[in-house]
Amino acid sequence: MRRISIGTALALTIFVMGCRRDDEIQTYRVSKEASPTMPSAGPPREITWTTPKGWKEQAPSSMRVGSFSVKGENVQEADVSVIPLSGEAGGELANINRWRGQIDLEPLTEAELPKHIEKITPGGRPMHLVDMANHGKRLIAAIYPQGPRSWFFKMLGEDTTVEATKPTFLQFLNSLKFHEN
């Protein structure tokens, strides 16, 4: 007589039960999670800004503390995000290469990186700015290391919309105010 192990018996039981046919269709209701909303009141935020005219503020997400939609001509849009991450968040080269991949550009090497970065100081804060375009898309981003985290301010969208909005993006960076919690 052959013996069956407990694990084999359990697997066979689950298999047989899973193969059972019921003629009755079962439906389930799962409540939808509420979408995050912009806090109108509550604890003070770590960062505040002045929203530029024409930018439509969107609800933040799990990563974004700020999110905007910018309309250009011919119904073109650009997306602006404000994202804080811990430490160096993988490093400048890795982030810039990830962004380059978003518009189908080849990665840069460490040696090439300085040629693609502009040093800016909006509001007296040292930041690195990148501006890249490819296949009708443009991405402008600023990186600001501040204390234990790095802040990423990025605008991505149709080339002419993002290019035309670059001065407003720079004004937005100038309006940033950081607050200690």
Image (cartoon, rainbow, N blue to C red):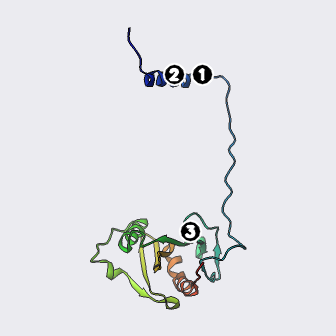
Q: Mark 2 vs mark 1: which is more N-terminal? A: 2
For the residue pair 99 and 159, the one nearer the viewer reads as 99
Instruction: Bin the neighbour count of mark 3 within 10 Å (Cα to Cα): few under 14, some 14-19, many 20 and up.
Output: some
Mark sitting on residue 13: 2
**Residue designated by label 3:** 64
Image point 55% across, 25% down: which residue? 18
Mark sitting on residue 21: 1
Assign a secondary structure to mark 1: loop
Residue 138 image point, x, y percent: 46, 74
Q: Are marks 1 and 3 in contact (CB under 8 Å)?
A: no
Q: In this view, does 135 lie above or below 169?
A: above
For the residue pair 132 and 119, the one nearer the viewer reads as 119
In which quadrant will I find the C terminus? bottom right
Residue 153 image point, x, y percent: 51, 76
Residue type pointed to by label 1? Arg
How far separated are the C-alphas under marks 3 and 2?
A: 47 Å
Residue type pointed to by label 3? Arg
Residue 30 image point, x, y percent: 68, 44
Assign a secondary structure to mark 2: helix
Residue type pointed to by label 2? Thr
Q: Do the residues labelled 2 and 1 touch (CB within 8 Å)?
A: no
Q: Mark 1 vs mark 3: which is more N-terminal? A: 1
Image point 61% across, 82% down: which residue? 49
